[in-house]
Every structure is written in structure tokens, then in C-alpha cells.
Amino acid sequence: DVLSTVIADQPRFINLFVRRADATQTTHEWLEDGISGRSVAVASISGLNATLSEADAVKIVKGTQLTIAGDSALFEVTNVADTVATLKLVAANGSAKEAPGEGDILNIVSTPIIEGSTKGEETHHQGGVEYNYTQIFRKEIVLTGTALAVNVYGSTDNALTQQTRFALQELTRDLNRVALFGHRTKATTTSNGAAGGLYEFGLQADGLGVDGGGKAIDSYIVNDAAQALLGAGATPSTLIVSPGQARVLSAEYKDKVTIQRSDDRRGAYVANIINAITGGLMTIYADPDVPDTDAWLVDPAGFGLSNLKGRAISDEDATPKGFDGIKRMALGELTFEFKNAKQRLCRIKNLLSSKEAIAALRG
């Protein structure tokens, strides 16, 4: 006979965040991993002199061997001067190409090392610093003396326990939406501190993205995003979509789901799909807070949640002296980490709405 309200559509995205070391300042900084994809892009080409971006030029050295994506010809770097790499054709391998073209992607094969070497191919783990701000979350649980006295509300202990549970559920929803849409704001005398979320970090300049072109989501679009992440050095393993888009994607695999006779459940909802780029599984997270025409393919290894030291979310009694009832307070301060957002997050935008896609499937 206590409150029986159920918060519908429980959030899912927040579950991907693992506990990190506590933050010690309201501006929480972390070291970025030195993720470098094993490929470079040709900005321009003159003969066999390929101009690369600064970020790509540091990935190769004299002796590095390369192939053009989608082609078998093998090239070798004979010299690197600033951002210009001079190439030579080592083996045609059945290809007619004698040089890469502008805009080509060159996959790094390897860098053969001399016998008795004293130095190998360098990789750098530390790749810079990023930051987010901490945000205070607070919920008040209030039961008046009258509410506690009237029998219809049930016992005091049960009512208080239920109210506290619902308040913490609301707090979880708030955390989920901040993790998605939050805009990082430094605390000042005129503004409260706020944490940035997925869209803040994922839509940075040079971030990864795929345009769905107004079409229904399918494995081809998802694999385009997976290829972008893999090329940046990340491991695409989690797809975050709205529940409607999860249904659309599930319909593609409907005829590939086997139901065993001993099963006591029926249906064809697909929670995992095969990544055609890596051959591994990608988990589908259907989150009701994700915009219906968007999807995100991510490498969740970069997600983290850091409490400000000594300020983890907890609930405690907050009944003031003389108050006619009981008050409890859920209070905490924390922030979110998005390590290597430019390499680990890929937005799939401009999808056909799930309502239209499902209607077309039914038709």
C-alpha cells in the first residue's frame, strides 16, 4: 500500500561508465591515450611525393611499407621531410597502380627493422590532456507528518524507502541525460558548474561521423561507422540507439535468428550484431534518451565516471529541527571522462525516423 509508481524506460547509456580515480579539483583532467590508426591519408600528391597531415606524418619513418586501401601494390617510404613522404613502388602484386592518388588512404603494413638495431618503431601512449568539470546533483525526499500519519500511505519505513528509491532513480535519469547532452561549464559567481556529455565531446572538430542520408539504419551504415573508428585506432563494440531504431536494426536480422524448441520465449529482438569490419560482436544499447534520428557507435573503453574526492552520491537524513515530517537528501558531485573522444566516438546522423522505417517494413 505504498507508492507504486514505476519510472518507465530506464536509461542505459550511463551503465557504460566505469569508476575512475576520484577527481581532486572541480576541473578534472585526464591523460589522453596515444591512439594512432594504422593508416594515413594523402592530402595531395606530386609524382611519388605524398603530402600528409602533421598527425599522419609522425606515424611513418624511412622504410615504412604502405598499401593503398583496396589495392595490392606495395610502396616504401624512402624519405620523410616535414609532412612530405617520398615513396617508391616495391612490388606491384598484380596491381596496375604506380602511385597513390589524392585522397587515397594508405594502410601501414610494417616497418622492417635492421639487424642489430638499437631503435625500433616508436609508439607514444600519452597523447595530450583533456578535461571536464564536476557537477553537483541533489535530490530532496520529503514526507510530511500528515502523510506519515494517514494509513493509506503505509508504514513510515516503507514509504521512506520507496521515496528514496524513486529519488535515486530520478537521479540516475539525470546522470544519463547529462552524460549524453551535458555542456561543460566552469563554476563561477554567476553560473553553476556543469559536466559535458557525449555530444559535447563527440562533435568536436575533427571528430568522426557518418551521414545516414535519410535512410533507415542498417548494417551497412553501422559498418561504415565501424570502419571510421577502426581507421582511427579504436575498437567499435557498442551501438547506442533509440528503442525504435533498435527495432529497425533487429528487423534486418529477423530471418537469421534461430529459436530452439526448448526455449520458453519467442521473438526476434537482436541485442548483438556481427561487426563485418572486425568480425567481432557489437552490442546494441537501446536508450530512450537518444534522439531517434541519431545513433552513436563507440569504443566504451574511454568512458569513465569520477566522483569529486569525498563527494560520491549518497543519501542521508536532512530533517531540520521542528520540521513536521521527515526529510532525506541525496547529494553528490561528479564528472564524466571521455578519453580520446575524437577516435572512440562516431556519430551516425540524419537517419530515417524509426516510425517511418517501421511503417515501411510493415508495408
Image: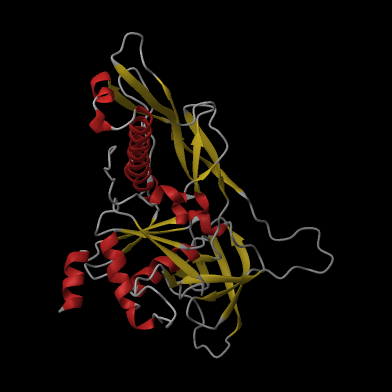
Give the percent coordinates (x, y) of residue 68: 50, 76
Front residue of 6 and 197 = 6
Residue sitting at the far bottom: 94
Q: Residue furthest front?
A: 151
User: Is 154 positioned to the left or the right of 125 in the image?
Assistant: left
Q: Which residue is most to the right? A: 116
Q: How is the image coloured?
A: secondary structure
Q: Is residue 148 above or below residue 336?
A: above
Q: Residue at x 35, y 46 (%)?
A: 180
Percent across and percent down for residue 80 are 60, 61
Residue 8 position in % (x across, y down): 27, 49
Say if 119 sits above or below 146 in the image. below
Q: Is 67 or 247 nearer to us in this picture?
A: 247
Total labels drawn:
0
The answer to whether any part of residue 44 appears in the image is: no
Which residue is pictured at 32% across the width and 27% down the height? 141
Q: Quadrant of residue 271?
A: bottom left
Question: How far across and down, in percent of the image, does residue 76 sit?
Answer: 62, 73
Q: Nearer the viewer, residue 327 or 44?
A: 327
